[in-house]
């Protein structure tokens, strides 16, 4: 997976935050391509807070925007985040960990009787090297 780290420069002064945000580019054909961040359960700092097609990501350079990637990422602008506990090196390390795609469950909405499934009815896929379907009965949780 391609990784990107972007320094946070858009928050007003006085708001505590870490150095930046970490993103990965998911290639077309991967089971998580096109799955929105709020439908991917992953053990990453503060959870995933962003997802978009690379063409819509102005923070990427032109070559990466044209690469047909699905971009997902996290930020370090949560309660108690600071430059001291989330320096650039920590954001880079967390982004590399995210890119390994361990402990990620892709959530795919399926139709149930012609109606969208409810949150607890999603079908997930374990992606630690073996794609394996798992059915979850109640909401989101840790990867199995």
Image (cartoon, helix red, strand yellow):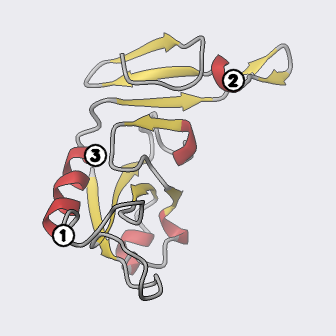
Which residue does the image show at 45% across and 22% down from the upper left?
125
Of labels 2 and 3, the one closer to you: 3
- Are discs 2 and 3 less than 8 Å apart at CB? no
- Looking at the rendering, which quadrant does residue 65 occupy? bottom left
First along the sequence among labels 1 and 3: 1
Mark 2 — residue? 110
The residue drawn where x is 41% and y is 38% is 30
Mark 1 touches mark 3? (CB < 8 Å) = no
Whole-percent x and y of residue 109?
66, 29
Q: Is residue 125 above or below residue 34?
A: above
Query: At which x and y percent is residue 113?
Result: 84, 13
Instruction: Please tell me which residue is depicted at 73% across the width and 24% down the height of the picture.
Output: 118
Q: CA distance from mark 2 to mark 1?
A: 43 Å
Circle 1 Cα neighbour tier, 10 Å, few/some/many (<14 / 14–19 / ≥20): few
In this view, which residue lies farthest toward the left? 89
Name the residue tied to disc 1. 84
Q: Splitting the image into 4 quarters, where does residue 74 fall?
A: bottom left
Looking at the rendered structure, which numbered label has been put on residue 98?
A: 3
Q: Is residue 98 left or right of residue 13?
A: left
Q: Residue at x 50, y 57 (%)?
A: 50
Front: mark 2 or 1: 1
Left or right of 48 in this view: 19: left
């Amino acid at each position: 997976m391609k990784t990107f780290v972007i320094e946070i420069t858009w928050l007003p002064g006085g708001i505590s935050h870490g150095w930046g945000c970490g993103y990965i580019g998911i290639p077309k054909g991967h089971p998580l391509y096109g799955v929105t961040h709020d439908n991917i359960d992953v053990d990453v700092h503060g959870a995933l807070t962003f997802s978009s097609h690379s063409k819509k990501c102005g923070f990427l350079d032109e070559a990466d925007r044209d690469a047909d990637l699905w971009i997902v990422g996290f930020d370090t602008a949560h309660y108690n985040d600071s430059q001291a506990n989330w320096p650039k090196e920590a954001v880079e390390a967390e982004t590399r960990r995210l890119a390994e795609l361990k402990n990620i469950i892709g959530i795919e909405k399926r139709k149930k009787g012609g109606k969208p499934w409810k949150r607890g009815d999603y079908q997930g896929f374990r992606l630690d090297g073996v794609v394996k379907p798992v059915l979850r009965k109640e909401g989101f949780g840790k990867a199995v």
